[in-house]
Image: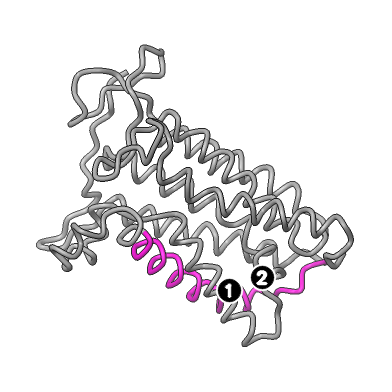
Amino acid sequence: MTYPSIDPVALSIGPLQMHWYGLMYVFAFLTGWLLGRFRASRSWSAWTAGMVDDFVTWAMLGVILGARLGYVLFYDLSAYLADPVEIFRVWNGGMSFHGGLVGVVTASWIWGRRHGMGLLDMLDFVAPLVPAGLFFGRIGNFINGELWGRETDSFLGMVFPGAGPVPRHPSQLYEAGLEGVLLFLILWIYSSKPRPSGAVAGLFGVLYAVFRMGVEFFRVPDAQLGYLFAGWVTMGQMLCLPLLAAGLWLLVRAYRGEGRA
């Protein structure tokens, strides 16, 4: 297959430009907000629509700041030190999921303290909303023609501009399908009724880590980092290990009776 070359600029009005990558973030937050309001309407939910409206601003700030700073620190610190202004050019890509996760957890903790809600209860509510953002984020990567996969002779192979004439795995779409669609369906169904405290967040951590670590075998690591060791371990896989451990701990804790039903 040939990569369907898409202009990264979705709309231009004079000197102003709207990039698809930024637009994907708009879609992500809008979808998460609407899903959150729906979850708040369920009879078992301690949330209200007004609470969701208030929290979404905190979540946006946490995700954007965390994702950008995470990428700067974990993936390409030297380049950003050489050109600090590049930190603000988010339309060029360069957002870290793990940094965004830390940002939204921090925002949840602060907001929860202000409203008398525990962190695990916050994360259990937020976790099923995250895959929608992951889906749109990976579609943004695909449109940008970045984060492509390894060379392949599979029928799924796609020729990406700037990646040579050899077909490669469209790893962005693999991640959109696994971390976006499949993870959303599993979490949405699982969280459709009350679960022990921390169980939903724990399941998210385990499944995301497994899906991401698996796709990393098909994805080319960031050029400035390459493989960290053994010729196959990537930064993405390393950053997933603490998330996997935390998710497993939360699930064990929840189903050993330590979580609140």
Q: Earlier in the sequence, mark 2 or mark 1?
A: 1
Q: Is residue 55 left or right of residue 4?
A: right
Q: Residue furthest left?
A: 15
Image height check: is 48 above or below 205? below
Q: Position of residue 109 (x, y in %)?
A: 59, 77
Q: Position of residue 8 (x, y in %)?
A: 23, 45
Residue 108: mark: 1
Specify the principal SS of the magenta part: helix
Q: Amino acid at mark 2?
A: Met
Image height check: is 123 above or below 151? below
* Discs 2, 1 touching: Cβ within 8 Å: yes
Q: For label 2, count other residues whose C-alpha is less than 10 Å away and answer few (under 14), some (14-19) or many (20+).
A: many
Q: Position of residue 136 (x, y in %)?
A: 44, 48
Image height check: is 157 above or below 200? above
Give the magenta part as a residue range: 44-70
Q: For label 1, count other residues whose C-alpha is less than 10 Å away and answer few (under 14), some (14-19) or many (20+).
A: many
Q: Amino acid at mark 1?
A: Ser
Residue identifier under label 2: 122
**Residue at 37 percent of width and 30 percent of height:** 231
